[in-house]
Image (cartoon, rainbow, N blue to C red):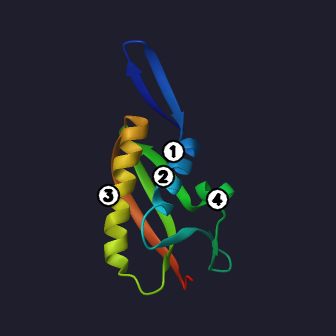
Amino acid sequence: MKGRMNTELGRIEIDTDVIAKYAGSSAVECFGIVGMASVNVRDGFAKLLGKDNIARGVEVSIIDNKLDIKLHIIVAYGVSISAVANNLLDNVKYKVEEFTGMKVGNILVSVEGVRVTE
């Protein structure tokens, strides 16, 4: 699936994998986020992803030409999850809309774990 925009110069298509990687990179910039998580459905365990696999913690779909984004995150121990999530929502929405030129419809944040950071 690809995001599509028509401009006066032609058509622009952005693959959802590119959007997922950008959204994941924007997410890990936020205070209180340790990283993105990959969830093993069978075992129910969350795994902290490295920078090379950051897009695996993001699901992107396009509905009515708007982006729906689901983020699987791991937060730092001792931070306010609601404050971190609100900051995350604002940051990812703004950066993805600026990057793609498309509107973000919904962002769902799933906190998959808490980690103690040094």
Q: Are marks 1 and 4 in contact (CB under 8 Å)?
A: no
- How crowded pointer 3 is (Cα within 10 Å; few <14, some 14-19, many 20+) is rated as few
Whether 3 is drawn above or below 92: the answer is above
Earlier residue among tags 1 and 4 = 1
User: Label 4 to label 2, Cα distance in Å?
Assistant: 12 Å
Using the image as rendered, state which of residue 31 and residue 12 is in the foreground: 31
Residue 95 location, x and y as percent?
39, 47
Q: Nearer the viewer, mark 1 or mark 4?
A: 4
Q: Secondary structure at mark 4?
A: helix
- For badge 1, the amino acid type reads Ile
**Residue 23's mark?**
2
Give the labeled residue for mark 1.
Answer: 19
Earlier residue among tags 4 and 2 = 2
Residue 21 location, x and y as percent?
56, 50
Q: Secondary structure at mark 1?
A: helix
- For badge 2, the amino acid type reads Ala
